[in-house]
Amino acid sequence: MRILSIDFSIPYLLKDDDYPIGGWAVQLSIWLRALENAGHEAALLTWKGALAHVGSGQQITLIETYDPTQGLRVAKWFYSYIPKIFAAARAYHPDVMIQGASAVDSAIMAFVAGQLGIPFVHRIVNDVNVDERCKLDLRFDEWIAYSWARHRTAAFLCQNEYQRGKLSALFPNTPVHVLHNAVVVAEDAPAPLPRAERRYVAWLGVFRHQKNLPLLLRIAQELPAVKFRVAGMPERGADQATLDAVNGLCHLPNVELVGYVRRADVQQFLSESTMLLSTSDFEGFSNVFLEAFAVGTPVVTRRQVDPDSIIVRHSLGASAEHELALSKSVKAFWDMGENEYNAFAQRCQSYVKANHSPTVKARELVAALTPLVAKSKRAAATRYETIQIK
C-alpha cells in the first residue's frame, strides 16, 4: 500500500529544532516509520527546502511542495499551493491520503484525493474537532473548508470513544475507527527510576490556552513544598492569560522554567520526575502521556483528558474530577511511599509496552485502510471497463 500524508512541522521534528511541535506531527512520524517497517510505502508532503534542512539519513520520505513564506495572501493557494500539492501527489501515485488536524489542508487533501480517485482519510487529533467547539476555534473560511472536507472523508480515524460517538452521529454512513496513539519503547528500555531518584513534578507542552497554565500556577502556589519543572515555549500569538500565568510561574521559588526540551531530551526529563502533571482543558490522546508511561512516570491529570479513562482503569496515575482534587492528587503522589510508588512506575511501563506498540498500531491502521483502498480500486476498474466498452 502507498500512503501519502501532509505536514509542515515534521522536518523541524526530524532536525530536533527549537520549534513548537504538535502532537499530530509526533504521532504521524511514528506511523510513517512503522508503515515503512511493515513493508508499506509512505511519504510526507511538506515545504520546499525541507530536504536540505533535514539532511540525509532520515527514514521518512519527504516530498517538497511549496514555500509557505512566498505568495500573495489568498491568491497563492490557487496559483501555487494547490497546484504544487496536486502535482506532487499525482507523481507519487498513492493508494490513499491521510491528513490530521482541522485546517485548510483538510480541504486541499480531500480535493486532491478526489481528483486522483483515491480515498481521503481524516485523523481527528483533538476532542474539540468533533463538537461545537470546533467551529468556534476556526475562522469562517477555515470552518467552511474543514466542513467541506469532512463531508468528503472516506473514513475517520479517532483517538478515543468520545470522538467516535460524536462523529458516528454526525456522519452515520462513514466508517469511524478508534486508533489509539503509539509510542516507541525499546525492547531493552531501562527499568523505571525508583522514587528516591525522582525530584520534581514535570509539566510539558506548548504554552497555549487549552493547556491551562493559570491552573498550573494555582497548583504550584498551593503546594510550595513541591518542586515543579515546566518545559515548553509559547505558541505564536499566545493569549494574555497564558502569558500572565507564565510570568507568575517565573516568580515562584518552587518552579523552574526550563524552556523548550528537545525530543532527544524528553525521555530523561520525564524519567527523573515523580509524575507528569497535565492541566489541559481538553486533548484527544496526549502523546506525552504515553512518553511518561514509557519511562515509568505516572500521569496526574483531569478526568476530561484521560483518554477512554485508561489512567483510571489501569491505575496509571490519577484522574481528577475537579481542580481541588487535581491539587490533592499531586500532593498524594509527591508524598507516596517508595514501595507503592515503584509499583505504579512498573505498571505504567508494562502497560504502554503491551498496548501502544507502533507495530501493532500500524497493523490496525492498515486494517482500517485496506477495505477503502480495495473499494477505490474496484471502482477505478469499473470505470476503466465502462470506458473500454464505449
Image (spheres, grey):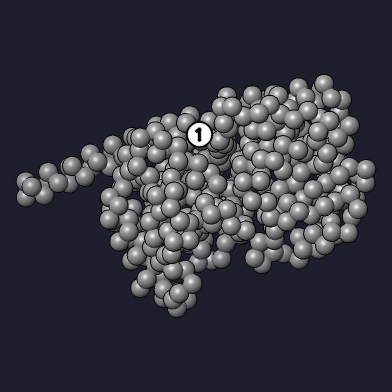
Residue at 81% x, 59% y: name it.
Answer: 245
Point out residue 38 in the picture as x, y percentages from the top left corner. Answer: 39, 33
Q: Which residue is mark 1?
A: 358
Q: Amino acid at mark 1?
A: Pro
**x 66%, y 61%: residue:** 235
Residue 151 seen in the figure: no
Instruction: Identify the image quadrant of the N terminus.
Output: top left
Q: Quadrant of residue 275?
A: top right
Secondary structure beneath dot 1 equals helix
Left or right for 202, reference 185? right
Left or right: residue 363 compared with residue 307: left
Q: Position of residue 307 (x, y in %)?
A: 64, 36
Tell which residue pokes out farthest to the front in this image.
56
Q: Residue at x 44, y 61 (%)?
A: 52
Q: From this view, report whether residue 48 is shown above or below residue 302.
A: below
Place residue 35 in its image quadrant. top left
Residue 315 drawn above or below residue 269: above
**Of the pair 279 and 12, the residue shown nearer to us:** 12
Task: Say whether residue 255 is left or right of residue 305.
Answer: right
Residue 360 pos. (x, y %) = 48, 29
**327 above or below 251?**
above
What percent of the width, then of the height, locates residue 80? 37, 71
Note whether residue 287 is visible.
yes
Of residue 34 and residue 308, the one placed in the foreground of this image is 34
Rendered residue at 77%/63% (across/down) = 243
* Furthest residue toward bottom: 72
